[in-house]
């Protein structure tokens, strides 16, 4: 059975996990909590050190077990997320076998959207009324179990965009409410955006991707930010999001 963990627990009990799980958590800590303080996502770094993040480990993202485990973890996470702190996020590590590890970035992107679609099919709660179901609407966000999440995916195939590179498939789920005090209309959000962009420019070997905009901006599409390509080019305006909300799910 999949289980949620806090950093404080893993720091004391890491040896109880499988070898790949131990390795994934250690490498995550080395990346986010690097001594040189170069990791671009300042809120994520803060969340790591303040123990606001929660972690889960699931199987190969191509398999059905991974979808079932992820659905279970997200339901559990929703019940405790607001008690974890202002920098809350759920970090899910996926077992990444060698054949998947060596796949091109396009394969990882296909698997990412397939996983989200299959996860959506497991949802037993009505899609929130305030969130559009059309990914091409500027206020769309992926929802599960009644909660809206910004999602970030990192893979072994990302190389130039170092901020999206990780030796295992990694998905971060940030509840939408985390951004209530950190958005483009607040001074704190504006300053944080400037700082993160500055750090991204120093961290990555490509420029900040043009798809990275604030939620609610009429020109923004959240789905384009979930899985960023390694190059700088943005998906064309005519590009279709691979995710489709199932209509009968809206009527539960």
Image (cartoon, rainbow, N blue to C red):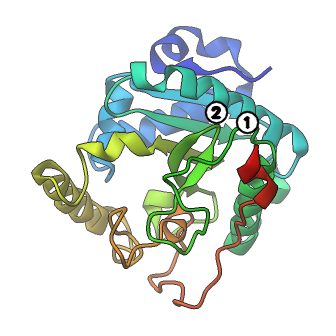
172 w.r.t. 140: above or below: above
Q: For numbered disc 1, what is the local secondary structure?
A: helix
Residue 34 appearing in the image: no
Q: What's the residue at 47%, 20% (across, down)?
A: 7
80 w.r.t. 244: above or below: above
Q: Residue 130 location in percent, x, y?
A: 48, 52
From this viewpoint, which residue is outermost toward the right?
64
| Residue that carries the numbered disc 2 in the rendered image | 74
Between the residue at mark 2 and the residue at mark 1, the CA separation in whole angstroms equals: 5 Å
Q: What's the residue at 35%, 65% (across, down)?
A: 216
Relative to residue 47, is residue 139 drawn left or right? Answer: right
Q: For numbered disc 2, what is the local secondary structure?
A: helix
Asked whether 139 or 165 is in front, the reply is 139
Q: Residue 9 location in percent, x, y?
A: 52, 11
Residue 198 badge: none
Residue 170 appearing in the image: yes
Relative to residue 41, is residue 149 drawn left or right? Answer: right
Callouts 2 and 1 close, C-beta under 8 Å: yes
| Residue that carries the numbered disc 1 in the rendered image | 71
From this viewpoint, which residue is outermost toward the top?
12
């Amino acid at each position: 059975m999949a289980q949620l963990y806090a950093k404080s627990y893993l720091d004391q009990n890491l040896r109880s996990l499988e070898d790949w799980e131990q390795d994934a958590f250690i490498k995550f800590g080395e990346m986010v909590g690097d001594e040189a303080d170069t990791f671009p996502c300042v809120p994520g770094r803060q969340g790591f050190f303040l123990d606001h993040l929660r972690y889960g480990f699931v199987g190969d993202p191509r398999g059905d077990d991974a979808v079932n485990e992820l659905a279970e973890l997200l339901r559990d996470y929703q019940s405790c997320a607001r008690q974890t702190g202002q920098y809350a996020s759920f970090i899910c590590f996926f077992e990444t076998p060698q054949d998947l590890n060596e796949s091109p970035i396009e394969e990882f992107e296909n698997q990412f959207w397939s996983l989200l679609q299959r996860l959506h099919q497991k949802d037993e709660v009505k899609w929130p009324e305030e969130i559009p179901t059309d990914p091409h609407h500027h206020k769309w966000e992926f929802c599960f179990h009644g909660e809206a999440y910004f999602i970030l995916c990192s893979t072994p195939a990302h190389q130039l965009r170092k901020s999206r590179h990780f030796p295992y498939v990694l998905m971060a789920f940030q509840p939408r409410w985390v951004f209530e005090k950190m958005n483009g209309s607040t001074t704190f959000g504006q300053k944080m955006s400037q700082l993160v962009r500055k750090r991204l420019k120093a961290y990555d070997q490509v420029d900040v991707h043009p798809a990275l905009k604030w939620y609610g901006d009429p020109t923004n599409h959240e789905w384009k930010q979930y899985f960023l390509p390694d190059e700088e080019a943005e998906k064309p305006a005519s590009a279709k999001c691979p995710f489709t909300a199932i209509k009968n799910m809206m009527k539960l």
